[in-house]
């Protein structure tokens, strides 16, 4: 079976990247990371990749005069690698429409809320301020509208009276590290197909996000 080829985009420590690497090395995920690319050349996630002999590319966004120029350079780097999927794993830049259109629907993002709730930043604090009892994580296809593409999988957890933003972030990370390798494994097995419309899972269109609770035995 052909391995799923990935390019992973990061901006920080790369904990989701590490979860994907671990899944590959334990043979839970039949995939190959062609490169890890960061807009911050000092990002620790690049060091994580190098420790596993994965090629890395640092492109400092501050060296470009416009977002469009930066994304064009990023696009050229990715095109040269020809990955099946582009994985946003803590990539903290809004992508331009031209970049998204070029790769659509092959860009995945993981977002720390139960979309469509809390698009954008500070999701954990917003959940606390609204006294939510349930919070979670979503994996979705990236479209030009921020955090609004078709959602593939969601995982959720309880919010308790003792929680703060930091503890919710820890709970979210614990789910993220399970969810990203799972969704990528579905792609590698061709159980999941990304289309220009709604994604397809096990030959059925995903009308509502899949729930992680139904796939815990697959992790």
Image (cartoon, rainbow, N blue to C red):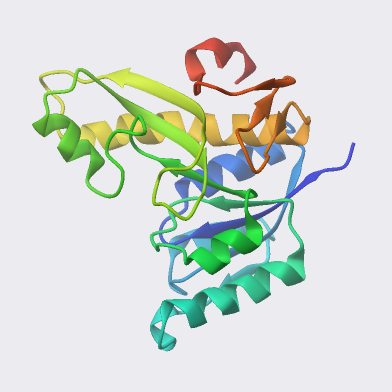
Which residue appears at 43% of the width and 87% of the height? 63
Q: Residue 113: image x %, image y %?
A: 33, 34
Work out whether residue 166 or residue 133 is closer to the camera in this orientation and state it.
133
Is 130 positioned to the left or the right of 103 in the image?
Answer: left
Is 98 positioned to the left or the right of 31 in the image?
Answer: left
The image quarter containing residue 124 is top left
Q: Residue 88: image x %, image y %?
A: 51, 52
Q: Can residue 50 be spotted in the picture?
A: no
Direction right: furthest residue: 1
Which residue appears at 47% of the width and 67% of the height? 96
Is 92 positioned to the left or the right of 187 in the image?
Answer: left
The quarter in which the N terminus is drawn is: top right
**How many tags in the picture?**
0
Direction front: furthest residue: 197
The image quarter containing residue 64 is bottom left
Q: Is residue 11 above or below residue 32?
A: below
Is 158 positioned to the left or the right of 101 in the image?
Answer: left
Work out whether residue 66 or residue 218 is closer to the camera in this orientation and state it.
66
Q: Residue 170: image x %, image y %?
A: 31, 34
Q: Is residue 51 above or below residue 208?
A: below
Which residue appears at 50% of the width and 24% of the height? 209
The quarter in which the C terminus is drawn is: top right
The image quarter containing residue 147 is top left
Q: Residue 126: image x %, image y %?
A: 16, 37
Which residue appears at 22% of the width and 46% of the height? 122
């Amino acid at each position: 079976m052909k391995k799923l080829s990935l390019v992973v985009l990061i901006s920080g420590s790369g904990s989701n990247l590490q979860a994907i690497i671990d899944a590959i090395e334990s043979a839970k995920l039949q995939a190959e990371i062609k490169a890890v690319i960061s807009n911050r050349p000092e990002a620790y996630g690049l060091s994580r990749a190098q420790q596993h002999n994965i090629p890395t590319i640092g492109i400092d966004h501050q060296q470009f005069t416009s977002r469009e120029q930066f994304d064009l350079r990023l696009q050229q780097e990715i095109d040269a690698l020809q990955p099946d999927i582009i994985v946003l794993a803590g990539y903290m830049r809004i992508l331009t429409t031209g970049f998204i259109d070029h790769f659509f629907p092959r860009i995945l993002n993981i977002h720390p809320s139960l979309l469509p709730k809390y698009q954008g930043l500070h999701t954990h604090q917003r959940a606390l301020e609204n006294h939510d009892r349930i919070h979670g994580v979503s994996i979705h296809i990236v479209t030009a509208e921020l955090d609004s593409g078709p959602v593939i999988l969601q995982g959720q957890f309880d919010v308790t009276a003792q929680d703060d933003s930091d503890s919710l972030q820890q709970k979210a990370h614990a789910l993220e590290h399970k969810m990203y390798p799972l969704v990528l494994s579905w792609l590698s097995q061709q159980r999941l197909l990304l289309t220009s419309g709604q994604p397809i899972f096990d030959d059925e269109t995903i009308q509502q996000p899949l729930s992680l609770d139904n796939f815990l035995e697959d992790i």
